[in-house]
Image (cartoon, rainbow, N blue to C red):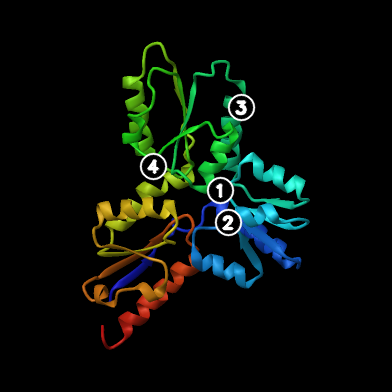
Amino acid sequence: MAKVEIDEGSGFCFGVVNAISKAEEELAKGGTLYCLGDIVHNSREVERLKAMGLVTINHDEFNRLHDAKVLLRAHGEPPETYETARRNHIEIIDATCPVVLRLQKRIKQEYTRQDDEDTQIVIYGKNGHAEVLGLVGQTEGKAIVIEKLDEARSLDLTRSIRLYSQTTKSLDEFRRIVEYIQEHISPQATFEYYDTICRQVANRIPNIRKFAASHDLIFFVSGKKSSNGKMLFSECQKVNPNSHLIDSPEEIDSSLLAKASSIGICGATSTPKWLMEQISSAIQEKLQSPAN
């Protein structure tokens, strides 16, 4: 029978653990607790907390809320969210990841102290991502967001640039963007870059590559909305084409199991350990059934 292993390095990062712990603490006190957006990009964990009483709301619903208690997830929020909370007498339970919070402060300081209005604040990140919206909000919406190296080519390289990164982006791609700007920026302009990628996330890339390469078959467990999940899954595929993205035991393709002698289970920073354990149990049950 095939060996089944769960990657010890996969699962929730510190920021997600902290947000979920705060939610559970507040829910244990009773009363209604709202969360602005999915607390984590994993539908199974969202459902678990919903069953405990957590009510997920969007920004429109938040703006209409008064005299309530709202948890801000690890991704962080722009300044206007806090202003709305003050205006509507909303008690904020702030679970913004400390790494994200430090990055927000750095970008805000850079924006407020700028002597030269011609300087561009550029953020390497996913447009529309919750964390990126919070970062852009520190600049009154003026920061430029680029998602990949190709988009760096459209920057105005005659003007000075201050480059930051979303905390969960690829370190390799960030370095390629830095090199491109260094090579092409005008001599009259200045360029400063800040590697603000979370090392707890960045270090998972070499680790997950090693794990994926050590098994015949990989099941990468992640919510479909997780950008970190998409990035880490692509790293698995680079070293092991027999890698498959699933978010529940029901998505396991039994036909894949018969050909594998070694099966690995890994996941994103938003993937709960209990879900990976469920996947492992389901695989072992299928391996023990007569059909396999």
Which residue occupies the foreground of this view, 40 or 282? 40
Q: Position of residue 198 (x, y in %)?
A: 49, 42
> What's the distance in space between the residues labelled 4 and 1, CA to CA?
17 Å
Mark 2–mark 4 Cα distance, whole angstroms, equals 24 Å
Q: Residue at x 65, y 65 (%)?
A: 54
Q: Which residue is mark 2?
A: 37
Question: Are dots 2 and 1 in contact, CB under 8 Å?
Answer: yes
Element marked by disc 3? helix
Q: Amino acid at mark 3?
A: Gln
Asked if residue 47 is positioned above or below residue 72 in the image, the reply reads below
Name the quarter where the C terminus is drawn. Answer: bottom left
Q: Secondary structure at mark 1?
A: loop
Task: Find numbered disc 4 in the image and state the secondary structure of the residue it sits on.
Answer: loop
Q: Which residue is identified by label 4?
A: 170
Mark 3 crowdedness (10 Å alpha carbons): few <14, some 14-19, many ≥20: few
Where does label 3 land, which residue? Answer: 109
Q: Which residue is mark 1?
A: 75
Task: Give the residue at x 45% y 70%.
Answer: 277
